Image (spheres, helix red, strand yellow):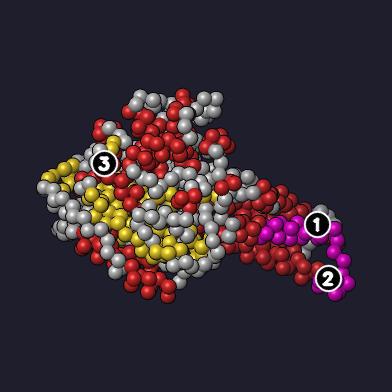
Amino acid sequence: MPSARICLNTIVPLLVLVLLVPGSTIVAAQRPLSSQVIPGTNLPIETKDTQIEPKELERFIDRLVADRMLTYGIPSYTVSVVQDGKIILAKGYGYADGEKRVLVSSGRTLFRVGSVAKLFVWTAVMQLVEQGQLDLNADVNDYLGAFAIPETFPQPITLAHLMTHTSGLDKRDRGEIVPSTDQVLPLEDYIQSHLPPRVFPPGQVHLYSNYGTNLAAYIVERVTGMPFEAYAEEHILAPLGMDHSTFRQPLPDDLEGDLAVGYYWRAGSQQGQPGEFEGITPFGLTSNAIDMTRFMLAHLGNGGVENQRILKEETAILMHAPHFRYDPRLPGFTYGFFEADRNGQRLLTHAGGTLQFSANLALLPEQQIGLFEAYSGGVPGSGFLEEAFVDHYFPLEPGPGLQPLPDLFPPVGSFRGAYRTTLMSHTTVEKVIVLLKSGPQVTANDDGTLAFMGSRWIRTGPLVFQKEGSLELLIFRTQDGPPDGKVTTLLVGNTEYAKLPWFGYPGFQWAVLAACVLIFLASTMAWPVAWITRRRHGRQADLVYRVTTGMSWGMSAANLLFLALFAAFVFYGNCLIYGFSTLQKGVFLLPLLSLGLAPLSFLAAVFSSTNGHPERLLTRATRFYTILVAASGIAFTWWLDYWNLLGFHF
């Protein structure tokens, strides 16, 4: 499909049209009031009369989607909402194909759902668990045959660890989205060729792992003897009647024409391209809003919908229960779902995204409500509807204002600083992504509160703060445990952030890079200028001068060339997603020059001032220049190593 740009002038009249299209008008059954407790906690949930009037819901979603599409430049959008076993809204917005003016249909237009497909992998695992073919607590190596996960730590990795993303395997995402089906790897080849190192003992740190999900899907294949896409079709898609969904890549002929055009952002504009593919099958689910209602209803029904059951009730309850939390007061992770707590409502969610598509599934089990949405394009970080939905239908009841607790230890200033998520690659070049995204800052206010992520947080305990106007908590950990010790960790929601040392601050890291780049630029320009000046005045440089300044120039030019090529690889070649070719990997040889030339040029500058030959001494200016460039080379080498860019960390 040819490239196309979508602009707001196209979307505005389109939205006027789609807002007039009626949605579903099925009425949800009314349920009685009851008091419940979030499983695994002592947090109460007040289950209210949650009957949602479909027409009012449609008006609310219409306004919300229209605003999102205009704000973020989203060309195609679909959404479905279920309640009490029924669909109460299913609707499409915008164009599935902007050039051909094909409107989005909630029951026909297909979207790639990215990591939402993980929920199907975990559902398949739980099916085999209840059949006795898999054991959640067994060493995964028991199912892998000749291939094995290294015994880096005494504790083995289990399926339970994989399902809560606490296996300790490093985060590695490259090669999981590819531009053509030729690059889609068989699952077994991927598992054996892309094994990341184990960086944490299992069961201690949530480190979201695409590899871990693929490993689980591979175990499903080995146990059942079926390719995962075939297993999912036979045991999940077909029983649920999801006959317009598939894991197959490329799409079957009868579905290919229904895929929405994939849009992505490049150089500030939105462009379409023929497509993208998941590099491995288990993430390759393509579906629509109506089909996804069947999956939501099955999980809201604890494994069954109407007369079809994909899980036993007790299995589904086990799957939906929390199995890992950093703190009992915070949401955590079930066997596959992310927990969230908003306005006292427990949500089970999972989001997904590719370069071109985004999707999200959210369940409110206690309210028997499910929400699915997917869209193409949109500014990165466009977000999803679930928070606005919960705020609209389950607003937080106003309560008495919190007052900060005074005179607590440690002092509020102890929490001040920069933090970095542990959800990052620790051993590969992908670590640099957290620098590009930066990280959250915690600021201490004079009134004893904290400023964090644009909100004010009020102290309710020695290491606990509550978000103003919300039930959300911010919990800190210290090195030696509460209440004493140095603050090391911040917990919010189900995410852990580590407090950074001074040299890890994004501002410091960018300052080091900027200083090195400026010195390298000055060096590369000064050397040819000096050469031309000498030629004009008929002066001949001696060997010491030529070698010393030549090394400085070569090191500076190599480092600048590396940075320019690496930036091109990242921002235009999407190499942190697609992976690096052999030729691109060769570019990482360039900064290795600094490793050798920086100390050599430094020693040459020092030697030239003490060699006993005054006629060959470098001038003070030349020595200063050489030492400055050498110091920059050493600093740049440290910077590259800090971000796993020195050497071949692929």
Q: Is residue 419 visible?
A: no
- According to the picture, the residue beneath numbered tag 2 turns out to be 534
Q: Residue 306 in the image: x percent, y percent?
A: 24, 41
Give how far apart the Cα atoms at labels 1 and 3 are. Answer: 77 Å
- According to the picture, the residue beneath numbered tag 1 turns out to be 547
Give amino acid for label 2.
Arg
Which of the marked residues, 3 or 2, is nearer the chain's N terminus? 3
Q: Is residue 482 left or right of residue 531?
A: left
Q: Is residue 646 left or right of residue 534?
A: left
Q: Is residue 326 left or right of residue 610?
A: left
Q: Which residues are magenta?
A: 532-561
Give how far apart the Cα atoms at labels 1 and 2 are. Answer: 16 Å
Give how far apart the Cα atoms at labels 3 and 2 are. Answer: 85 Å
The residue sitting at 45% across, 51% down in the picture is: 255
Residue 184, quarter of the rendered image: top right
Which mark is in front, 1 or 3?
3
Q: Are marks 1 and 3 in contact (CB under 8 Å)?
A: no
Q: Is residue 314 visible?
A: yes
